[in-house]
Image (tube, grey):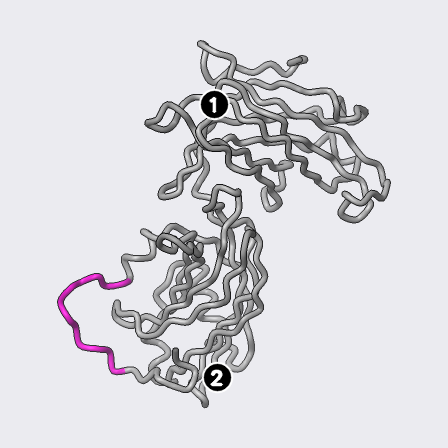
Amino acid sequence: MTGHFKQHSLSTHNNTALCYGQNYRRGRRRETDEDGTEQLVVKILKALDLPAKDANGFSDPYVKIYLLPDRKKKFQTKVHRKTLNPVFNETFQFGVPLAELHARKLHFSVYDFDRFSRHDLIGQVVVDNLLDFSEGTGEKPIWRDIVEGTAEKADLGELNFSLCYLPTAGRLTVTIIKATNLKAMDLTGFSDPYVKASLVCEGRRLKKRKTSIKKNTLNPTYNEALVFDIPNENIESVSLIIAVMDYDCIGHNEVIGMCRMGSDADGPGREHWTAMLANPRKPIEHWHQLVEEKSINTYVSKSAAPSPKPNIVVDSPHSE
């Protein structure tokens, strides 16, 4: 039942559509509620006649869902392999006051999962007039045509960490706090993320440190300190590359996203580094948007020819 929100479909040759249910809970505390407050409950049921994105004639679809205009909080379903008609049956909850519901929109993005490259956007559904469906029980399925959407900027997630430098001891402490909304790298719809920090000088990686691995999550919490010993006279010559990795017990560990700190880094990375140097012995905490590996690797030499090692002493009891 498409109601009065009919949109142009992704293809005129079939009925590419998404089916979901929604209802609104007013302050009733249930075991499934996060805090017993008012919640919009959305159940993603299934999709129909999706286009084939893979050479085998199928796709590996999953759905991301936002309650606009907030893009910080998102949910996503599990990935369904080799199908054009996936059945999801997954329920998600957004805490939102009833008085705000008229100004919010549900945004569904249907993606094709790809383990080794950017996930392909199949299409999207945007639903407004959420109050019209807030009185239901959520049992009544709602169908919406999936429409073409513009590919979003690579949504890799964000990383929160602090930098603290002690000039007299020549010690840099990178405290990895947490990450949010990481890109799913596994078919479960999750990743097994850990964080790797590399100290770089003149294009060479001098030392690296890494956190523990957090299993099956896109929002890991670490609170782990990674320590590098860097003499005060060398601190302006080095930079820091931080990569969020997905652990794979069988194949290669994959980069989810990266960021770079240093006096010559771009925007936020330079600002964070400068604030650290201006406030010695004080941890400076920032959030950083992760970017693709290729935009960072230009700062790291991949030349096969050996180059003289920069004259910086970094070996210490904290070294690996």
User: Is there a contact, CB below 8 Å, between mark 2 and mark 1?
Assistant: no
The chief SS type of the magenta part is loop
Establish if 234 lies above or below 74: below
**Which quadrant is the N terminus positioned in?**
top right
The disc placed on residue 84 is 1
Q: Amino acid at mark 2?
A: Leu
Residue 304 is a magenta residue: yes
* Residue drawn 56% across the image and 53% down it: 180
Relative horizontal placement of residue 207, taking residue 98 as reference (left or right) = left
The disc placed on residue 167 is none
Establish if 152 lies above or below 84: below
Question: Residue 229 at what x, y percent from top left?
Answer: 40, 82
Residue 61 is a magenta residue: no
How crowded is the residue under tag 2: few (<14 C-alpha within 10 Å), some, or many (20+)? some
Establish if 206 lies above or below 136: below
Establish if 222 lies above or below 142: below
Relative horizontal placement of residue 138, taking residue 201 as reference (left or right) = right
- Find the magenta span and give its range: 300-311
**Viewer-side label of 2, 1:** 1
* Element class at badge 1: loop
Outermost right residue = 28
Q: Amino acid at mark 1?
A: Leu
How crowded is the residue under tag 1: few (<14 C-alpha within 10 Å), some, or many (20+)? many
